Structure formats: structure tokens, C-alpha cells
Amino acid sequence: MKTSITIIGAGMGGLMLARVLHNHGIEFTVYEAETSFTSRDQGGLLDIHEYNGQRALKAAGLYESFLKIVRPGEDAKRIVDKEGTILLDKLSNPQSSQPEVARGDLRKMLIDSIPSNKILWGHKLKSVTAIDGGRHIVSFANGTTVNCDLLVGADGAWSKVRAIVSDSKPLYSGITFVEIAISSANNKENLDFIGQGTLIAASHGKALFAHRNADGSCRGYVTLKKPEDWFKSFDSANSENLLHGVLEEFKDWSPKLTRLIADSECPPVLRPIYALPATHEWNRVPGVTLVGDAAHLMSPFAGEGANLALYDGAELGQALVNDYADVEKALLRYERSLFPRSREYAIKTAQNFERFFDETAPYSVVEIFKKI
């Protein structure tokens, strides 16, 4: 008897799982809330790590395709203090074990690796109802309902599938990212200061990240350790007001750095950082499991989120291939491996997070990148 596999979310973890299942002729359907791949900006660059993300890509037969979208030369890192003094200047390494790739390029590669009719766009999850034998009825906001034998929550930070297996909810980390971007026009002075890849400036409770793109533009984030209410106190309809408020927090920083904020040409989009507890796990619930941020949301300060999502998807896919006749056995094996792996990286990420913003920054940040 065939198992009906429903994957909620066409992010890194859900797509990797879909790819592995497709490679082995196992039927599935991915349901994605977005109306199309182009319905939103896909975000910046990712470091894909040799020990998890790249292993997943190799297991899925996508490593050669991955190498074609790698951005050579953009893995350079320059770390400065708030005066703009260069403390560490790591040049690009063509043999890097964690090359950079655009998040959008990677997601598009994964989407293209499975049949187009396997992803149903515009399906926002509304509710899940348990029925007999570990099966579930999944309802979507567009009125569609499906019955499934296996439900996989790949639906990100605010996963609705997570609520079936766990009471845990993401908590605000104390840090919010404010997105900035500058086009290529009249950008030479900024680019020269950024260097060949990513500029990181940090001090106690605040940081600035700016990445130099090959087309002469740059994008990045201003990061502040502030309560969420501080950001909400600004008029959301007045982006200049928010940008001015952020700039005030950096008034003792070098103009070489603050102009990267002042010259930003995009609305200052707020991205508050949330995380699940490092110890997050759940008891085995028949017919349901999680991958990626739904399972182990963490801050980006170790660059593990997308890598773990890819690895989760590949591991779950292989577990199902190995034990397709006994799905519960496959899920139990997958989760027994998932929990200690997630905990290890969540603890590492939390430690990096603290070091990025403690009283020893930016020297603590230098020490982190010396080891990479």
C-alpha cells in the first residue's frame, strides 16, 4: 500500500526531502503558501558547509549543479571596529569548504530538481485534524483539503505543524535585523570600504553587516539588541523615521560605517530574530515529523539554519527510502538522530550569538572568524 506523503513548505528542508523521495520513485506532494517562487525576495547569501549542507546535496545528486551556482570570490570577510579600523581581513579562498551561494539560486535549483506538478503553490495551511491510525486531514486557506498518511512540517519558524507534536514556541532573542541595500550607482566608495565580500562591524549590543555583490551593489543588515517594542514605537508608514532612529544608535560610529545605513535605498525591513530552546524535541507522534526551522529554529550566528534544513531533508528522505514499509520505524530513527544534532548546533549558535554582542565585541567576533 502506498503511503500518502504531504510536505508543508517549499523551503530548503521540504524541497530536499522532496528531491530524495523523487530520486527513489516515492510519491509526495509539496504544499507552499507563497503563490510562486518570484512572489517575494529570496534573501541574501548562504555558506553551505561541507559537513552537512554539502553532504545533503551529494546524497541528493545535486552537488555538481550546486557548484555551478557558487559565487566564487564572495566568501571574503572583513571585520572592523566602530571606528572602521580593520581587525581581520580574510581573503577569498577558491578552495573554501563552505562556499557562498545566493539563497534564491539554491532554492531555484532544488525546485527545478523535482517535477513542477509536485509543488502546489498558493496553499497556505489553515488547520490539521488527526484521524485514525496516525493519519491527518490537512486544510488550506483556499478551501482545499487532503488526507495524508505522513505529514511533514517544513513550514518554518512559525510552523503550524509543530503544534501537533510540541507546545514550544519561538522566543524573541533580543536582536532585530534591519535590512539595508545600496544600488551599484555611485557606490564605489562604499564598495572599497566593504572589501571583496562581507564587511562585519560590531560593538557591544550592535553590529553592521554589508555584502558586496558582483554587480556593484551591496545589501546587508543593521543589527541592534533592543526590545521589540523599541522598533514598534516607530511609525511603520514612515521608513525614514525608523532609519533615523537606527542611525541615532550608531552616532558614535565612523561615518565610513554609518553612510552604509544612511545611503540605504530600500525600506528598512525589520527582521526580529527568534529561536526555539536548544533542547527542543518531542515525543513520537504517529504520522507527523518536522524538518528545518520548524524543528530547530535558531539565530543565524553560526550559519547553520539552511545547512541543517538541507541535511534534515536528506536524512528523513533516506530513512523513508530504507524503511518505506514501516514509516514509524523510519521516523523514529530520523528523530533519534535529529534531536542531538539540533541541540549541538543550537548551543553553538547561542554561544556565537552572545559573543557577537557582548562587551568584548568586535574582538570576540574576530576570534570566531579566525577559527573558520
Image (cartoon, grey):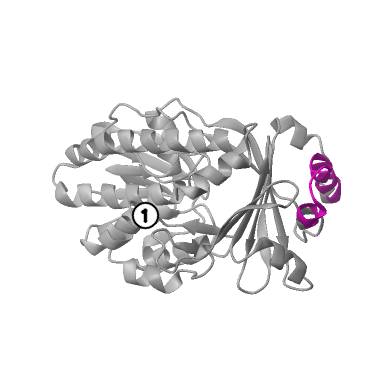
**In the visual, does 15 lie left or right of 350?**
left
Q: Main secondary structure of the magenta part?
A: helix
Q: Is residue 172 above or below residue 25?
A: above
Q: Nearer the viewer, residue 280 or 127?
A: 280
Residue bounds of the magenta highlight: 240-259
Question: Is residue 194 shown in magenta?
Answer: no
Residue type at mark 1 is Gly
Q: Where is residue 361 shown, x and y percent of the image?
A: 63, 38
**Residue for badge 1:** 53
Element under disc 1: helix
Question: Is residue 251 shown in magenta?
Answer: yes
Residue at 63%, 42% (x, y): give it: 362
Q: How many marks?
A: 1
Q: Nearer the viewer, residue 327 or 352?
A: 352
Q: Where is residue 157 shown, x and y percent of the image?
A: 51, 40
Q: Quadrant of residue 273?
A: top right
Residue at 35%, 68% (x, y): give it: 115
